[in-house]
């Protein structure tokens, strides 16, 4: 893992600027600079055994702050792909639920339907009543349209998604690992 996403993670000299600017830093047991150190030391067990890399928002604040241009956001994204491809460090249930729900909404409507996303996410994650008090206010203010938006190219979106799935299956059958070889459950 010393070279992750074609980046030499050993170039990180642990200044901590990435962690200081991370909006999720307080939620993560492993801060971005810790993830970089563990990647440099090839500590898969610790990296894949913690939820920290799955909590990353990929906002790239860490990468913008890095004085050594190491690009922690890209490294974390590559680590997620590696974990998913290896079947190690499965993403938390709520992360898988969100990604599956998001992709299903895109597949169904060609765009994001917030109400559909929320309903599917709640069913998949089991968090049925979390944030339920916010829903009426958002609906009455028009923040959550009930009817999904319509696009004329939904067939083309479905064709693109089907082609990506066929390629993922073909790569998996060929034993290739890479960003398209996991099932989308752990992707970010």
Image: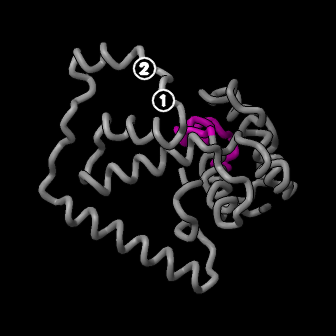
- Quadrant of the image occupied by residue 57: top right
Q: Are marks 1 and 2 in contact (CB under 8 Å)?
A: yes
Q: Which residue is mark 2?
A: 132
Residue sitting at the far bottom: 174
Of residues 36 and 144, the one drawn nearer to the viewer in this rendering: 144
Of residues 84 and 66, the one drawn nearer to the viewer in this rendering: 84
Magenta residue check for 64: yes
User: How far from the left and from the top, in percent, is residue 152?
Assistant: 12, 56
Residue sitting at the far left: 152
Is residue 151 left or right of 5 when viewed as pictured? left
- Quadrant of the image occupied by residue 55: top right
Is residue 37 left or right of 54 when viewed as pictured? right
Instruction: Determine the main secondary structure of the stretch shown in magenta.
Output: loop
User: What are the residue bounds of the magenta stretch?
Assistant: 55-71
Question: Could you tell me how far apart the alpha carbons at marks 1 and 2 are, in whole angstroms?
Answer: 8 Å
- Mark 1 lies on a secondary structure that is loop
For residue 128, the mark is 1
User: How far from the left and from the top, in percent, is residue 45?
Assistant: 85, 54
Is residue 97 left or right of 147 when viewed as pictured? right
For residue 92, the mark is none
Q: Is residue 22 above or below residue 72?
A: above
The residue shown at (28%, 54%) is: 108
Colouring: one colour
Dot 1: within a 10 Å radius of its alpha carbon, few (fewer than 14), some, or many (20 or more) residues? some
Quadrant assignment for the N terminus: bottom right
Q: Is residue 49 above or below residue 15?
A: below
The residue shown at (53%, 31%) is: 127
- Mark 2 lies on a secondary structure that is helix
User: How far from the left and from the top, in percent, is residue 123?
Assistant: 46, 39
């Amino acid at each position: 893992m010393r070279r992750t996403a074609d980046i030499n993670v050993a170039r990180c000299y642990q200044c901590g600027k990435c962690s200081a600017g991370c909006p999720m830093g307080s939620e993560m047991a492993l801060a971005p600079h810790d993830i970089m150190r563990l990647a440099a030391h090839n500590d898969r067990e610790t990296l894949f055994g913690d939820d920290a890399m799955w909590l990353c928002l990929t906002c790239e604040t860490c990468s913008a702050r890095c004085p050594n241009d190491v690009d922690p956001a890209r490294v974390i994204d590559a680590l997620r792909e590696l974990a998913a491809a290896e079947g190690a460090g499965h993403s938390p249930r709520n992360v898988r639920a969100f990604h599956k729900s998001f992709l299903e909404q895109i597949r169904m409507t060609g765009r994001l339907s917030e109400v559909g996303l929320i309903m599917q996410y709640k069913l998949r994650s089991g968090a049925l009543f979390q944030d339920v008090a916010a829903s009426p206010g958002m609906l009455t203010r028009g923040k959550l349209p009930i009817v999904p938006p319509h696009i004329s190219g939904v067939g083309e979106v479905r064709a693109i998604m089907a082609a990506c799935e066929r390629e993922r299956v073909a790569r998996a059958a060929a034993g290739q690992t890479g960003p398209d070889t996991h099932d989308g459950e752990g992707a970010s």
